[in-house]
């Protein structure tokens, strides 16, 4: 096999493993994703190997092994600096809870092993000499760009309900369509998604949303009604999701995963708090939640500013600028930049999702807002308390007061004034300003 899409070192190491198995009298082939991706001219990230050798035979042939999934016949063989999952040919019978095969039976024919795999494009094997074993015509489906179940779709989805989401995920990331019978089987079995752990659903969803063609997957998710049937809360209908997907046509232009989630939740009309709760229920990592909610909080601060500053106000621009700067200081630059990135890919007329915005279209800033806000931010001399030329202790000393909660209030007040350009970030000026504030009994 001549690998053109894999790291040559990895391909060479895998070839050593395959060859050692065959020279010990067993059959061994590359299988699944690596064969599919090589034929598609897509980068091959890892290589799985399927073999007639029984697990204990694999263990005895290779000195460096990890018994990853011994009961299912999978052993990770370490070769050079690479690890390969070597799995004994097997069939699966009777599935528990529409997810796990209850019984794994080792078999002698590679075709039997290929039959248990989910889709034709994933059910191809290939040997050292390069010949393709493709009993279900996966190569033809690759050519036609079709995801098709091996065997009867309805049965295959009933055995393992996660396959339905894998189907959407492969169609979405590869930009393929789904074979008619496969789609029909999916619709018939969609209720079974309720048996799948939220983490697994989330992992597939991440690959769809964060992949190269998220809109394709979102369209299929809305048409299939799959997510409404999962374990995790999904408070929308298929048409809500379809409308949101159309609204976020530019989602694929966003590089960062967290921004794609923020955009989607924005389009689905979630508040920052609701988005946070939803992402938690969907088992997203804390860091993703915090950063998505942060972006939506900036949205909320900005819409509040637009609502509170009257459109005809001659000082409106400056008021909006101050509100924006205040939001950047409290919510962070990252979140602020995030919201500006979302605005760039949202349709110019965002009134559908932010209804009150239309009343404020008289604000000139709105039209050029992302560019203007960027300038406002670039002119901020400080962005956090640590940037201030005076520290809390110094300030308390100068005022001859004990440090306490008041100190935080004063420091933040100073930070805002410096950030807005009202006073210079100079120790004497800052201290003078604080004394003035005390004099005015603002404290
Ligand atoms: P990728 O790694 O890009 O997601 P892959 O095809 O390698 O793609 P894996 O999840 O790593 O996908 O699985 C490896 C192979 O195991 C698949 O190609 C497929 O043949 C088989 N497989 C994986 N999950 C299932 C499943 N739920 N049902 C049947 N076969 C499966
Ligand atoms: Mg894989």
Image (cartoon, rainbow, N blue to C red):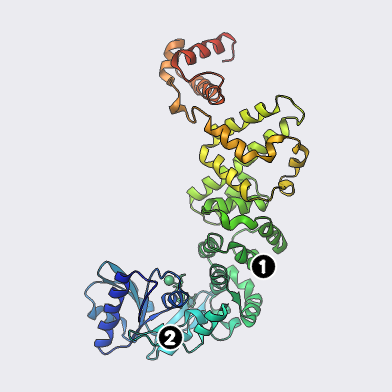
In-image side of 108 versus 196 (left or right): left
> Can the viewer see residue 353 in this picture?
yes
Residue 261 image position (x, y, % from top left): 57, 53
Residue 26 image position (x, y, % from top left): 29, 88
The residue lying at 34 percent from left, 69 percent from top is 7
Residue 409 image position (x, y, % from top left): 53, 23
Against 258, residue 439 (above or below) is above
- The residue pinned by badge 2 equals 113
What distance separates the C-alpha of mark 1 from that of mark 2?
A: 31 Å
The quarter of the picture where residue 62 lies is bottom left
In-image side of 95 versus 219 (left or right): left
Label drawn at residue 390: none
The residue most toward the top is 439
Against 2, residue 227 (above or below) is above
- How many discs mark residues in the rendered view? 2
Establish whether ligand 1 lies closer than 8 Å to the Cβ of label 1: no
Label drawn at residue 225: 1
Q: Residues within 10 Å of mark 1 (few under 14, many from 20)?
A: some
Against 58, residue 251 (above or below) is above
Of residues 422 and 371, the one nearer the viewer is 371
Residue 438 image position (x, y, % from top left): 55, 11
The quarter of the picture where residue 84 lies is bottom left
The residue lying at 57 percent from left, 58 percent from top is 252
Against 54, residue 84 (above or below) is above
> Can the viewer see residue 148 in this picture?
no
Q: Secondary structure at mark 1?
A: loop
Q: Residues within 10 Å of mark 2 (few under 14, many from 20)?
A: many
Q: Secondary structure at mark 2?
A: helix
């Amino acid at each position: 096999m001549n690998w053109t899409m894999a790291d040559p070192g990895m391909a060479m190491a895998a070839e050593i493993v395959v060859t050692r198995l065959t020279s010990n009298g067993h059959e061994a082939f590359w299988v699944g994703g690596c064969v599919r991706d090589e034929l598609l001219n897509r980068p091959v990230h890892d290589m799985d190997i399927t073999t007639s050798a029984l697990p204990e035979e694999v263990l005895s042939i290779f000195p460096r092994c990890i018994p990853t999934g011994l009961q299912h016949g999978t052993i990770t063989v370490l070769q050079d600096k690479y690890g390969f999952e070597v799995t004994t040919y097997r069939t699966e019978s009777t599935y528990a809870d529409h997810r796990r095969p209850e019984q794994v039976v080792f078999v002698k024919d590679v075709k039997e092993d290929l039959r248990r795999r989910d889709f034709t494009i994933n059910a191809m094997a290939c040997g050292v000499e390069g010949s393709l074993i493709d009993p279900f015509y996966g190569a033809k489906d690759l050519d036609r760009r079709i995801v098709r179940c091996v065997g009867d779709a309805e049965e295959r989805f009933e055995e393992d309900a996660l396959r339905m989401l894998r189907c959407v995920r492969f169609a979405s990331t590869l930009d393929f369509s789904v074979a008619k019978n496969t789609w029909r089987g999916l619709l018939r079995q969609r209720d079974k998604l309720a048996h799948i752990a939220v983490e697994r659903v989330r992992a597939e969803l991440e690959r769809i949303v964060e992949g190269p063609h998220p809109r394709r997957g979102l369209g299929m998710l809305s048409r299939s009604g799959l997510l409404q049937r999962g374990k995790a809360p999904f408070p929308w209908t298929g048409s809500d999701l379809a409308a949101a997907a159309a609204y976020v046509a530019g989602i694929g232009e966003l590089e960062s995963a967290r921004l794609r989630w923020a955009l989607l939740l924005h389009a689905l009309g979630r508040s920052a708090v609701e988005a946070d709760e939803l992402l938690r229920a969907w088992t997203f990592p804390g860091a993703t939640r915090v950063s998505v909610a942060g972006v939506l909080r900036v949205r909320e601060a900005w819409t509040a500013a637009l609502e509170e500053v009257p459109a005809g106000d001659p000082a409106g621009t400056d008021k909006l600028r101050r509100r924006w700067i205040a939001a950047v200081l409290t919510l962070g630059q990252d979140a602020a930049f995030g919201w500006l990135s979302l605005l760039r890919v949202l349709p110019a007329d965002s009134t559908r999702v932010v209804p009150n915005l239309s009343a404020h279209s008289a604000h000139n800033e709105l039209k050029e807002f992302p560019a203007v806000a960027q300038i406002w931010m670039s002119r901020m001399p400080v962005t956090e308390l640590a940037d201030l030329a005076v520290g809390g202790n110094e300030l308390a000393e100068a005022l001859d007061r004990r440090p306490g909660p008041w100190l935080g209030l004063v420091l933040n007040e100073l930070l805002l004034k410096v950030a807005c350009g009202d006073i210079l970030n100079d120790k004497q000026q800052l201290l003078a300003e604080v004394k003035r504030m005390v004099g005015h009994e603002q404290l």
